[in-house]
Amino acid sequence: MCTPGSIPVFESISAADFRSTIQPTRRPAILRGMPVGPCVPAWADLEHLKRHTPNGPVRIHVTTHAHMDFRRKNFQYGTLDFHTLLERASRDPEEAITEPFIDPRELYYLRSVSLDPRSRETVRLERDFPDLAHEFRLPEFFPPDRFFSSVLRVSSPGVRVWTHYDVLDNVYVQVVGRKRAVMWAPSDALNLYLDGDKSRVVDIDQPDLAAFPKFAQATPFEGWLEPGDILFIPAMWFHNMTARDFGVAVNVFWQNLDQGLYDRKDPYGNRDLLPGAKALRMLDNVMKQLEELPEDLKDFYGRQLIARIEKKCLLNEKCPE
Ligand SMILES: O=C(O)CCC(=O)C(=O)O
């Protein structure tokens, strides 16, 4: 195991520095003091936010448990008008809600999807929230033709989104409120008990080590985002995010690799890279083959497969400096 660390903070660097020295390291970074437009501090004013946004219905997560758990499904989906969502998510959590979905103290989380339900396009801030887009600027982190999506995220205080990875490089621009980010390198995949793109270890601060003993060997990197901070989340880095306050953020994704590697029918940008997805499907067939063998021989050939994969695919473990 490597020593747990902090996500490094880079003050007032340029977008060119990001492209030449930070992105190529394939390691997360907090970029502080970069120009993101008048959204900071303008969006901290709820009335301003309401004046500059349409009040259409949005699909949200509603939960009574701050730590959302995708396995126990301790949340449900609901629909609220956007302004009602803003009012409810920004209230003091001790304040009871009249006409809740589940409970007067429920919490909310929005990951914006296209407001046009028939649209198969990826979500874009400037299409669905044009006035907000006008007040938000992203430094030139990538060439415009690599843009994939820009997602508006709104969160009640305390809400935690489970540990998962994204297949695209992205930046999480924290506009309102503070947020805690805990991240793990892709090389920690075997210690995180994955179920698809998500980790089954929901409580990362008090993990159930009897159920998930290898989690103790995973190396977390932690950082706190302040309004105006930009977190660089390299593709495949696991991240777990907790809102300390009412939060508004813009999460921008781009295709950092050859475009042919991505699934073109993937509006959310969360499907595995094509060769990876194909390899996983082929492995299902391999496993089916091994099912024909007695248990001890299945174990024997399973170990041979592991040895080959270790030799051909895995990089040598190296602790990040
Ligand atoms: O908004 C958050 O707190 C987490 C969002 C996130 O990391 C994601 O869904 O990729």
Image (cartoon, helix red, strand yellow):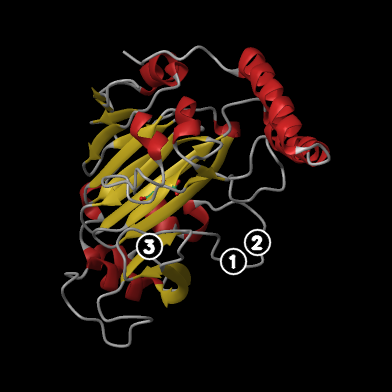
Residue contact between numbered discs 3 and 2, judged by CB atoms under 8 Å: no
Q: Which residue is mark 2?
A: 119
Three-letter residue code for mark 2: Ser
Is disc 2 placed on a helix, strand or loop? loop
Residue contact between numbered discs 3 and 1, judged by CB atoms under 8 Å: no
At horizontal 36% and vertical 15% (from top left) the residue drawn is 319
In the image, residue 53 sits, relative to residue 257, either above or below, namely: below
> Visible in this render: residue 299?
yes
Q: CA distance from mark 3 to mark 1?
A: 19 Å
In the image, residue 4 sits, relative to residue 175, either above or below, namely: above
Q: Which residue is mark 3?
A: 109
> Visible in this render: residue 39?
no
Task: Give x and y (percent) for residue 233.
Answer: 42, 33
In the drawing, what numbered circle is on residue 102? none
Instruction: Looking at the image, tell me whether mark 3 or mark 1 is earlier in sequence order.
Output: 3
Queried on whether the Cβ of the residue with tag 3 lies below 8 angstroms from ligand 1, the answer reads yes
The quadrant in which the N terminus is found is top left
Q: CA distance from mark 3 to mark 2?
A: 22 Å
Residue contact between numbered discs 2 and 1, judged by CB atoms under 8 Å: yes
Q: Residues within 10 Å of mark 1 (few under 14, many from 20)?
A: few
224 to the left or right of 259: left
307 to the left or right of 233: right
Task: Give x and y (percent) for residue 97.
Answer: 25, 82
Q: Which residue is mark 1?
A: 116
